[in-house]
Structures are given as structure tokens and as C-alpha cells.
Image (cartoon, rainbow, N blue to C red):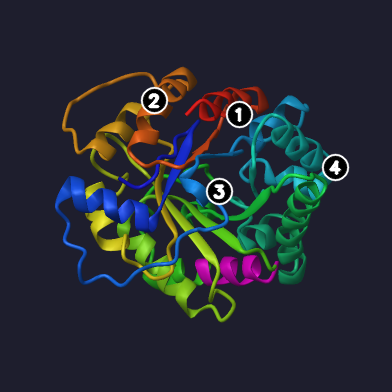
Amino acid sequence: MSHAVLMTPVAFFDVPMFRRFCTSQFQIAREDVPPMSSFDTLFEGDKPFVVDGVLASSLQELELDVNSNQSSLNSNMDCSGQDKIACNGLVKMGSCVLITDTYHASIDVLMKTRNYSEKEAIKVITTAVDIAKKVAASYSRKIHVVGSIGPYGVVLRNRSGHSVPDVSENAVKKYYDRQMNAMLSTGLESYCIETTPTLKEAKMALDVWKSQPNSLGKNLWISFSCKDGQFTHGGDHFYDVVHNLSAHPDLTAIGINCTNPHSDLSNLENNDSDQSSENTFRDYVNTIPELFKLNVRLFLGCCRENDRHVNEIAKTVKEL
């Protein structure tokens, strides 16, 4: 199906490719869907790409505490030089896409926990983006920078990004409006909404995205966390997610993240087998060739991994 992201790995399909796969595998009629713009700058020649996704772990290896409510974001606020060192390490190890250190950058949370003004909170976001931009610009090869937007769950400050908060639609939309407005002010061309627990939240986020005046023409990815081989953490069948979103005019990629790699394959193959396996890094690396055959094109590391893991992913992807 869409792409695959895991709590260690991640991978995305561009939407036209994703739609073709869904049409052939799941008999989802798409004749009535207008053509969509592909992510030309990334999916050039249909080749796979390696995305970092392991910044927090890399910072931890630099002896920074990332176990707070805002995880790696604290390094951006308190020791931004370490962010730059970590990003450089990830690029050197094979990553050609850097995700900004903004997943946990809830403006409301920053204002409450740090006693920041709104302007100061937004500055945390723009600083994180600037760090990634500067690292990318320092290389002769093309390094893409993607602005990360976490799910509403990051507001809860209990590391429960996969949860399905019982809050009003207005609260969720207000969160996304604030975050997206700040992220879009950075001028990046590409953004991702990560670890979305439900189709409902995804639709709310996309509604807010559409209302942003600066979102026109930008690349947007969205990924979901799944609890097993069929369902998101909120209970949506992942095929329903694909059916609902693959034709969305604002999306250029859809994916799965923070999910056991065997569950990803189950999702992507429409296989109902009840495979249980420890979500290890090796599982993920071993499934990369299969995921590639299923049109996955972006492969990432994630929590508890580091630049050496990214290097292993890069070596495997290079052989595809």
C-alpha cells in the first residue's frame, strides 16, 4: 500500500504510484480521480531514498538527554550545535533526506512548559528548520529537507504520540493550524505529518492544511502508526485509509510508521496472516527488498536507532 514507516524504519510511496498499486492489488476504482502531481524531486527515475528519522538517538549518543516530554527538541533549544553535528552525521552515513527536529515542537506546550511567548515558541521551530537547511546546503549532492509535524498526541506531553486523544475537533484543528502556520513560514518545499493515529485526525489535519494560504504547491506526506497488520492505532483499516486519501489533491505520499515491519508487509500485501515478530532493526532491513517491490520508495530509521543504522539502510537501498 502506501509507504512504510516503523519505529525504526519508515518508507513512503508517492501517491500516483501508490494509487496504481492499490488499483491493481485491491481493485479500488480510480478512473474518476484526476491526475496528481508526483514528488518529482524525490521520485525521479523511480529510485528509492534514505531518510534519517533517527535524530533523537543520534543526539543521545552525543550524551544529550532526549527523554523529556519534548524529546530531541530540547537540544534545539538548549544546544543547537549538537543538532547540527547529528544531522551532519546522518547525511555522511547515507541519508539524502533530513527531517526537521520539530515533531515535538508544539507551540502551546512550549509556551506552557518554557514560559515562552508565542513568538519565542515559533522561533524554536524556525531555528530547527534553519539548522537542517544549513546542513543540507553544506553538501554538493542534493539533500532534501522535510518539515516534520507531529500528531495532536504530542500536546499531551507524555510521549503518547500513538494515542487517540478524546478531545474536540476544534482543539485538534487549532493545534494543526498553529503548527502548520509556523512550519510553512520557514519556506520549505516539503512537509510531513507523522505518526497519525486515525483517519479522522488525518482528515482534520488535511482540512487545516488546505486552509493555509502558503500550502499551495508544497509537497506533503502523511504517515500512520498501525497496531498490527491491518489497523491503525485508532482502529481504521489501513486499506480504508488508502481508499480515502490516495486521491487527495494535497498529498504526494502516504505511509506507515512506528509499526512492526512484518505488519507493514501484511498491510502492503493485503495479507491477513497473523505474524508476530519482535520489532527489531534487522527485521526492517531484511524486509526492505520486499517493501521496494511493493512500491515503497522512502526508507527511514526511527526511535532507538542511530547513524550507523541509517548507514545499513543506505547500503541495502543502494543494492535495490
The amino acid sitting under disc 4 is Gly
Task: Specify few, some or many for label 3: CA neighbours under 10 Å numbering under 14, 14-19, or 20 or more.
Answer: some
Q: Quadrant of residue 310?
A: top right
Q: Secondary structure at mark 1?
A: helix
Expressed as whole percent of the image width and height from the top left, the position of residue 85 reads: 81, 36
Residue 179 shown left or right of residue 271 in the figure: right
| Mark number, residue 310 | 1
Mark 1 or 2, nearer chain start: 2
Expressed as whole percent of the image width and height from the top left, the position of residue 104 reads: 60, 50
Q: Is residue 41 above or below residue 181?
A: above
Residue numbers of the magenta segment: 176-186
Q: Secondary structure at mark 4?
A: helix
Mark 4 or 2, nearer chain start: 4
**Residue hosting label 4:** 81
The amino acid sitting under disc 2 is Thr
Q: Secondary structure at mark 3?
A: loop
**Residue hosting label 3:** 157
Q: Nearer the viewer, residue 168 or 241?
A: 241
Count the labels in the image. Answer: 4
Expressed as whole percent of the image width and height from the top left, the position of residue 261 reads: 37, 29
Of tags 4 and 1, which is closer to the observer? 1
Mark 1 or 3, nearer chain start: 3
**Residue hosting label 2:** 287
- Are circles 1 and 2 on residues that touch, CB within 8 Å? no
Task: Specify few, some or many for label 2: CA neighbours under 10 Å numbering under 14, 14-19, or 20 or more.
Answer: some
Mark 4 or 1, nearer chain start: 4
How far apart, in angstroms, are the residues tagged by discs 2 and 3? 33 Å
Residue 256 shown left or right of residue 270 in the figure: right
